[in-house]
Amino acid sequence: MKQKLQDIMTQNVASVSPQQTVAQAAQIMSQYNVGVVPVVQNGKPVGMLTDRDITLRVSSNGQDANTTQVQSVMSNGVMSGTTDMDVHEASKLMAQNQIRRLPVTQNGQMAGIVSLGDLAVQNVYQNEAGQALTSISQPAKPQMQSGQQQQQQPQMY
């Protein structure tokens, strides 16, 4: 019998609205000890906000987290699965789109979230999780600002 996302997803996921401030979103992340929150409007996932988004799109640009709205810095075009989606299919979707967390919907409404960790703790899905992580973890090349010389990157262990 094939396992569905509803069988392994995390339910009751903390989320934020597009109109909330980045500071409010960061407080929710801190409260729930998570590095990502789905952005939900009218029950539907419309984006994702990560701690990295906050660092690169808000803090490093000198924006005020207390006035910057989530919608201006969230990742749009959110991929999602459905509660009846097969776990193998979800793993492939995550690998193809290089995402570590997949919002799960039921009838278009936010129902939960599945992470690579959820796949990895299920013995039968460890291969899928590993394959997805391999695809997701393709190294990115640092972007150089104009006028900068490329520096040799240190080895990562």
Image (tube, rainbow, N blue to C red):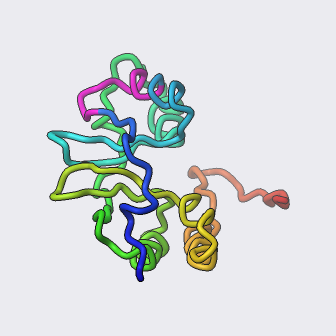
The image quadrant where one finds the C terminus is bottom right
Q: Residue furthest top?
A: 66
- For residue 22: magenta? yes
Question: Is 149 in front, or is 56?
Answer: 56
Question: Is 10 in front, or is 97?
Answer: 10
The image quadrant where one finds the N terminus is bottom left
Above or below residue 100? Residue 97 is: below
Question: Is 78 in front, or is 31?
Answer: 31
Residue 73 point in image, percent of width and height: 36, 39
Question: Is 60 in front, or is 131?
Answer: 131
- For residue 39: magenta? no
- First to last magenta residue range: 17-26
Residue 142 point in image, percent of width and height: 63, 58
Q: Looking at the image, which residue is at 45% across and 69% down? A: 94
Q: Residue furthest bottom?
A: 1
- Which corner quadrant of the image does residue 85 belong to? bottom left
Above or below residue 80? Residue 19 is: above
Q: Looking at the image, which residue is at 51% across and 31% down? A: 32
> What number of labels is visible?
0
Residue 6 point in image, percent of width and height: 36, 61
Residue 139 point in image, percent of width and height: 64, 67
Above or below residue 135? Residue 76 is: above
Determine whether, in the image, residue 39 is placed left or right of residue 145.
left
Q: Looking at the image, which residue is at 77% across and 57% down? A: 151
